[in-house]
Image (cartoon, helix red, strand yellow):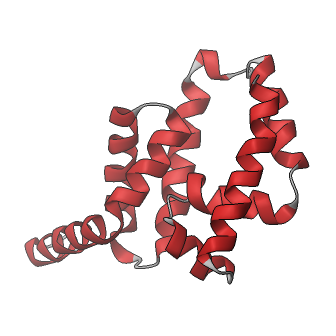
Amino acid sequence: MSRRDRAAGEVLVRRLFTEHGAALLAYASRLLGDHTQGAEVVQEALVRAAFTDTRADLFEAVRDLAVARLRTRPQAVMPATGSMEMLRAVEALPPEERAVLNALYFQGRNVKEAATTLGMPAETVKTRSYQALRHLRGVSA
């Protein structure tokens, strides 16, 4: 790789981080349960994605790297019983509530972004998020 290509790649990585870094870091940290490892995964994903400019590709790269790290953790092999119950509870939510939780908590979007992505008013996103979390609180109690 030439010096010029490397410099262009560095500029692109900085731009991608400026535009998407906060959301990617929140997403990776939630997936891994660790902010430091999340930051490392985001950095690696941005370097890998230096030649792609789509937000979806960045999130896919972060997810793939996070999953690879989780696979190397011995304690992550078998989720706790409570985690399985919560997973079943999330899967049992109405599709609209699941979609809202996914957008807000796993994709790192704010209410306005989630509303735009899901094609619904922001107030509906807030209501569905509240309803979903209320359903899930019953499982965690």
Q: Nearer the viewer, residue 7 or 14?
A: 14
Q: Nearer the viewer, residue 84 or 116?
A: 116
Q: Nearer the viewer, residue 133 or 30?
A: 133
Seen in the picture, residue 8 relative to 131 is either above or below; the reply is below
Residue drawn at the location 76% of the way across and 22% of the way down: 141
Q: Residue 35, image x and y in percent?
A: 37, 35
Residue drawn at the location 40% of the way across and 41% of the way down: 38
Res 37 quadrant in image: top left
Instruction: Tell me: 103 left or right of 45.
Output: right
Q: Quadrant of the N terminus?
A: bottom left
Residue drawn at the location 17% of the way across and 67% of the way down: 10
Instruction: Tell me: 103 left or right of 36.
Output: right
Is residue 14 visible to the viewer in this orientation of the structure? yes
Seen in the picture, residue 139 relative to 96 is either above or below; the reply is above
Instruction: Tell me: 81 left or right of 37.
Output: right
Residue drawn at the location 85% of the way across and 39% of the way down: 89
Is residue 56 visible to the viewer in this orientation of the structure? no
Numbered label tally: 0
Q: Nearer the viewer, residue 2 or 32?
A: 32
Res 98 quadrant in image: bottom right
Q: Residue 70, image x and y in percent?
A: 57, 32
Res 11 quadrant in image: bottom left
Q: Residue 36, image x and y in percent?
A: 33, 33
Instruction: Tell me: 125 left or right of 15.
Output: right
